[in-house]
Amino acid sequence: MTKPLRILLLCDDHPDHADTLHAHIGGMEQHSRHQIVRLNPVGIESHPLLDDLEFFDVILLHWSLVITFDTYLAPSVRARIHRASALKVQFIQDEYRWVDDITRMMRYLGVEIIYSVAPPDEFDTIYGSRAPDARVLPTLTGYVPDALVGLPAPAASDRPLDIVYRGRELPPWMGRLAREKLEIGRNVERLATARGLQVDIATAEEARVYGGAWLDFLRSGRATLATPSGSSITDFDGTVQRAVEAHLADRPDSSFEELADRVLAPYEGNVLIDVVSPRIFEAAATRTALIVFEGRYSEVLDLRRHAFVLERDYSNFDEIADALRDPSVVEGFTTAAYDDLIASGRWAFARFVTSFDDEIDCAARRRRAAPWDGPAPDGSARRPSFALVRSAVGGLTRLTGYRARHRRT
């Protein structure tokens, strides 16, 4: 086995963030054979770790950071990363927005490996001409943490509800696929209630459920709803978002269908990102049946074996409603999903991190990125609406004596 590499993991690990984010960061730290040190760079320009980046073999940029926003990575921090000789690796999600700006910043920072959640057949469209020197590798939005294996779960016949679901309304410029998270909830609630099913379905932001309460919520229902995670429009340079906002400024009461016809049609389907989300694994772990729209789901789901497939026109909902009343049918799907997605270990964090470790072992010995030969690209003082500027450094501060223990020899 090769000598462990020293990895600086830059991430926004604020405790208010979703459990799936913390699970991703924790899974990397727990299972890697390399020495990972975590630092939250949000709102800071100086830190002892940033003062000596040559100490690290790898700088890992986590998807919780928007690398073009100054509140996440200050310009002085980006300049230090640019100058560092370490291998730079980027985990990225939400590849439907700011693509031109983010890939330009990746090139400036010297990113050599991009872990993308997009389907591999879309890599060239997204990154081919924008990050030509980077190696793009597939990953998932999340994997199965150890805590999901062997969860207690009541039998289907003992669950008080037939269908449980929490969805949300996403920006219309993400396209029709993203809209489905809202529509499946609204339509199934209406249809299920009319057929006498007991449901707890909501799509309002204030109704969302987090933490341990989320797993309890899933265990209260025989089934939950799911759609492919992602988007059917990628807005490379902000054109689509600006067009939607301009239309809404003139016609604030426009429906999604009006936007789809008058604004989104030229862009719909330019890139299809229809991937699996951690919610799929959580449903399988709690033995809650999946009612899903058809999609690729990162090739994780076997739709015939793991889920009830709901037609997008809802024409087979009555058939699914009847099946939900038979616990043996429900448990046939939930047993298969649990065995294949959870118990098999195929989608475990540990397995993915082993492949990650192997990849960076090799990459650290074959440096490929072309050096940036222009001025530093402009960042942005903007930040996403969900982000808070925090001046304190979160995450790992357990570095006292770290360098002394791991001095280069």
Image: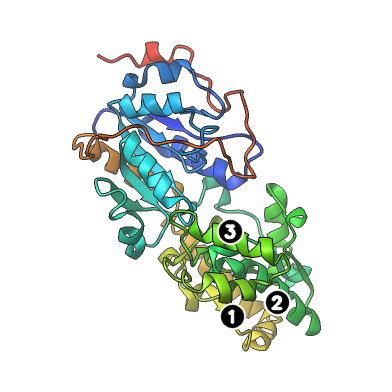
In the picture, residue 287 is in which quadrant?
A: bottom right
| Picture quarter with the C terminus | top left
The residues tagged by marks 1 and 2 sit, at their Cα atoms, a distance apart of 10 Å
Residue type, mark 3 in image: Arg
**Would residue 332 be found to the left or right of residue 124 on screen?**
right
User: Please, is residue 213 above or below residue 186 in the view?
Assistant: above
Q: Residue at x 55, y 30 (%)?
A: 42
| Residue 299 rendering spot, x and y as whole percentages | 41, 67
Q: Residue at x 20, y 40 (%)?
A: 368
Count residues near mark 1 (Cα–Cα under 10 Å), then give few for <14, some for 14-19, many for 20+: many
Q: Is residue 363 visible?
A: yes
Count residues near mark 3 (Cα–Cα under 10 Å), then give few for <14, some for 14-19, many for 20+: some
Residue type, mark 1 in image: Leu
User: Please, is residue 302 above or below residue 246 in the view?
Assistant: below
Q: Residue at x 53, y 20 (%)?
A: 397
N-terminal label among 3 and 1: 3
| Residue 401 rendering spot, x and y as whole percentages | 45, 11
Q: Which residue is identified by label 1? A: 310
Q: Which is nearer the eye, 203 or 323?
A: 203
N-terminal label among 1 and 2: 2
Q: Which residue is identified by label 3? A: 279
Pointers 3 and 1 in contact (C-beta within 8 Å): no
Count residues near mark 2 (Cα–Cα under 10 Å), then give few for <14, some for 14-19, many for 20+: some
Q: Which residue is identified by label 2? A: 188
Q: Which is nearer the eye, 386 or 164?
A: 386
